[in-house]
Amino acid sequence: MMPRFHPPYISPSDTGTACFKATRRSLGYLEHSLGNEKMVVKVYGKAQAVCPQRVMHCLMEKGVPFELVHVDIDTMEHKRPEFLQKQPFGQVPYIVDGDLELFESRAIVRYLAAKYADRGPNLLGRTPEERAKVEQWLDVEAINYNPWAFPIVFNLFVLPIRGLPANEAEAGAAVDKLNKVLEVYEKQLSKTKYLAGDEFTLADLTHIPATRYIVENCGLSHLLDDKKHVKAWWEDITGRPAWKKLSSFVETGGSNFSP
């Protein structure tokens, strides 16, 4: 997770009409409809934050209806006691799906991909062997990729937006480390179309939000562009319809969305 980048808060709501109107009047909602289905998942987070984007992208890939409950970062509502009862670490996102409350974005996307396996693309693999490969690269993203991606985004994108000075040394070291990780990716992607094989999975999906900011907002597109196979992979996964829909939603600040 990226606590400094996207701390959350809870906006109390229920599934009634009054809640729907209140949410719409506030900072927006995200609604998907599948026939006559009701919205089944609530995502507590901010549209622009990396980890909530992982979850929303997964839901869009699966065509699962959901509501985004906006998180107010600036007023630190993620530290309120009522929020900490749901997410004790004060981070986003967490979801409510029926009786289930779940936090940590990578755990959430695993859950959603398994629960809605019969919808949209298969994101977890079809066999134990395929699932193991997906899990392997999910771990790589969390352990080897994100620890360098986060300080880059935080120092070169988030802090400047807040009018605060970046730690250039920290950012520079992270760029060097991430470049080395991407060299490993280049070798892998010379053998397979996607990280875990020849189909798009969670292993690829989890990389997109942070990498998007690195490429588009941190002036570091060369990290991908100078690697033939990484560049082709990046263009492929960011060209997916679900990601394009999410990008459009993020640009609007999380107002309204219709599939």
Image: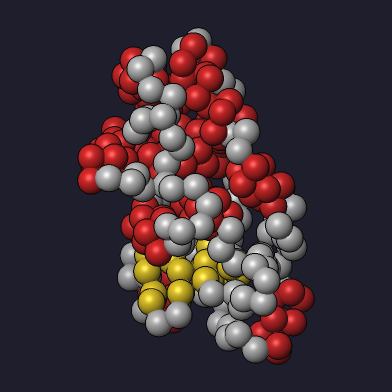
Total numbered labels = 0
Instruction: Please tell me which residue is depicted at 60% across the width and 38% down the height of the picture.
Output: 240
Q: Identify which residue, 231 or 151, lies in the foreground.
A: 231
**Image height check: is 26 above or below 208?**
below
Where does the image place residue 90, in percent across and percent down from the top left?
39, 65
Looking at the rendering, in which quadrant would you find the C terminus?
bottom right
Where does the image place residue 89, in percent across and percent down from the top left?
34, 65
Where does the image place residue 138, in percent across and percent down from the top left?
32, 41
Describe the colour scheme in one phrase: secondary structure
**Image height check: is 57 above or below 81?**
above
Judge from the rendering whether residue 35 lies leftward or rightward of residue 190; answer left or right.
right
Instruction: Please tell me which residue is depicted at 33% across the width and 70% down the height of the picture.
Output: 88
**Image height check: is 179 above or below 161?**
above
Is residue 173 something that shows in the picture? no
Instruction: Please tell me which residue is depicted at 67% across the width and 77% down the height of the picture.
Output: 36
Judge from the rendering whether residue 9 lies leftward or rightward of residue 251; answer left or right.
left
Where does the image place residue 148, in percent across and percent down from the top left?
36, 32
In the picture, residue 37 is in which quadrant? Answer: bottom right
Q: Identify which residue, 197 or 251, lies in the foreground.
A: 197
Q: Identify which residue, 227 or 190, lies in the foreground.
A: 190
In the picture, residue 47 is in which quadrant? Answer: bottom right
Q: Identify which residue, 153 or 99, lies in the foreground.
A: 99
Is residue 13 something that shows in the picture? yes
Judge from the rendering whether residue 92 lies leftward or rightward of residue 53; answer left or right.
left
In the picture, residue 115 is in which quadrant? Answer: bottom left
